[in-house]
Image: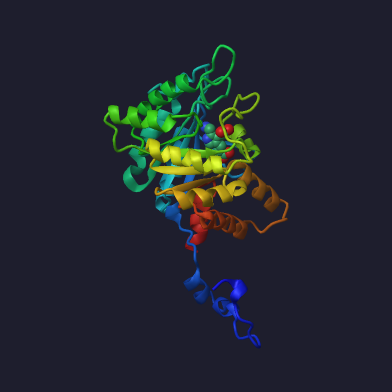
Amino acid sequence: MTSAEVPPVLGPTIRPRRLRTTPALRRMVAETSLEARQLVLPLFVREDITEPVPIGSMPGVVQHTRSTLLAAVTEAASLGLGGVMLFGIPTAKDAVGSGATDPNGILNLAITDVVAEVGDALTVMSDLCLDEFTDHGHCGVLTSDGRVDNDRTLEAYADMARAQAHAGVDMVGPSGMMDGQVAVIREALDAAEHTDVSILAYSAKYASAFFGPFREAVGSSLVGDRRTYQQDAPNAVEGVREALLDVQEGADIVMVKPALAYLDVVRRVRDVVDVPVAAYNVSGEYAMLEAAATQGWIDREPAILETLMAIRRAGADVVLTYWAAEAARLLAR
Ligand code: PBG
């Protein structure tokens, strides 16, 4: 029966409020869960620093040293998080992002450190993209006239996938939005006998102002924008197409990013794919809420949990969020 067909009732007999009477009843009928295991904590590790460096636009988030990173992942494991997503910040950058494939590059070293520290207690994931390693800040290598060269970038991603798998990563996260990236990475991993390394594909990743604080977090050198490879905000059908293509190419998990301004895309993708769906609660979403809370304009802890619940309710099985550890603590209370 649709609501239009609900017969008129004499008096207040039908009372949805009954199911909201007590905390126990509300808990029993809750349609959506929010649990530590569904949360993934993104972490930044920077080469050549001896103390963690705070990120101004993301209060509470730091660039880790190799050793403080280990404390953070140990805590993440003890809180029962689903995983961590590692981002590396190299000292030297160049046109082709050599630091990304160098076995002694900061991200590859950090992967090995982290896996040695937490073993199988967490899923260890790594960003597979060149932007942190290139001096021009783009996610790929450039043609002589300055455009991002899709197919040459794919070769670099294959190398990067091999390097990360060799370092011991459980799951790679290609975030560069190059066409064919998932297929090329899957093939490279399989050919190198890393058939167990899985792929979390940034499938529907939109060119977004909400990535602003992240650019500070990784000391990005980008001038201009990523609009020739990341998606346009008006397009949701295209986001679904990207996700379906990634599943066809062998993605184990598909992701929508950012989360909050694209919850409709999360829902549409969830409704059509048969793999887990992740959503990335990005830096700008974090910064907005933290800034409002600092002003005393919003009640921080319930707002964090409501935000993460909204992303889950939209259809995300897994949520990447800078609040992962804190949310796990709040949920355990
Ligand atoms: C690319 C990458 C970005 C983010 C994750 N991976 C930045 C970008 O595409 O510009 C953004 C994450 C965030 O804003 O929290 N390596």
Residue 208 pos. (x, y %): 62, 37
Residue 74 pos. (x, y %): 41, 46
Residue 129 pos. (x, y %): 48, 29
The image quadrant that residue 57 belongs to is: top right
Instruction: Locate residue 12 relative to residue 271 in the image: left or right.
Output: right
**Could you tell me how many numbered marks the image carries?**
0
Q: Nearer the viewer, residue 324 or 294?
A: 324
At horizontal 41% and vertical 40% (from top left) the residue drawn is 247
Q: Nearer the viewer, residue 64 or 214?
A: 214
At horizontal 59% and vertical 55% (from top left) the residue drawn is 307
The residue positioned farthest toward the left in the image shown = 193
* Residue 201 vertical position relative to residue 47 in the rendered view, above or below: below
- In the rendered image, which quarter contains the N terminus? bottom right
Residue 194 pos. (x, y %): 29, 33
Report whether residue 174 is seen. yes
Instruction: Locate residue 220 relative to residue 31 in the image: left or right.
Output: right
The residue positioned farthest toward the bottom in the image shown = 10
The residue positioned farthest toward the front in the image shown = 5
> Ligand 1, what quadrant?
top right
Q: Nearer the viewer, residue 259 or 127?
A: 259
At horizontal 46% and vertical 49% (from top left) the residue drawn is 272
* Type of colouring: rainbow
The image quadrant that residue 284 belongs to is: top right
Report whether residue 51 is seen. no
